Amino acid sequence: MRLQHANVVIPVGATETVAAFYEHVLGLRRIPKPSALDPRGAWFDVDGYAQVHLSERDGATHEDSHFALVVDDFDATLAALAQSGAPWTGQDDVFGGRRGFTRDPAGNRIELLERSGALR
């Protein structure tokens, strides 16, 4: 088994602001959505297999829900977060590398994990 996608709920009308964070700060590649689906939102490729989907929804927030991304260049990612003004809360190591949480512009929580230790 492997993760195919994580769906992140964002407010109606927030697609471009939130998509810019995933594309320009986290470095994910935006990919086309199937035309049969709601055109709002955006899809991103993580590694050629897993995807992150942004879906516009009225009033849906989940304060502690999150998904995790393993990051190849942790220092560059931390610098991009700082430059964008995104929050960062470091956490204790549990996988053999650095990790912590940020939030996208819609408030969704994202765990970032350094590619090291058990995460090769």
Image: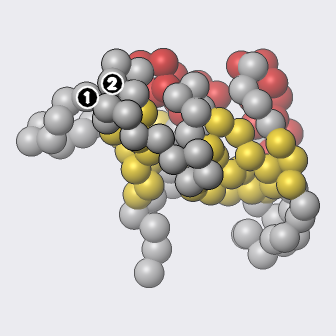
Q: Position of residue 18 (x, y in %)?
A: 49, 26
- Indicate the secondary structure of the residue bearing disc 2: loop
Let me know if residue 31 appears in the view.
no
Tell me the residue that label 2 is attached to.
12
User: Which residue reaches farthest front?
Assistant: 59
**What amino acid does circle 1 point to?**
Arg
Q: Position of residue 64 (x, y in %)?
A: 62, 51
Mark 1 nearby-residue class (10 Å; few <14, some 14–19, many ≥20)? some
Residue, x 32% and y 32% (percent of image)?
58
The quarter in which the C terminus is drawn is bottom right
Residue, x 71% and y 19% (percent of image)?
84
Mark 2 nearby-residue class (10 Å; few <14, some 14–19, many ≥20)? some
Say whether residue 42 is left or right of residue 47.
left
Tell me the residue that label 1 is attached to.
40
Q: Position of residue 95 (x, y in %)?
A: 81, 71
The earlier-in-sequence mark between 2 and 1 is: 2
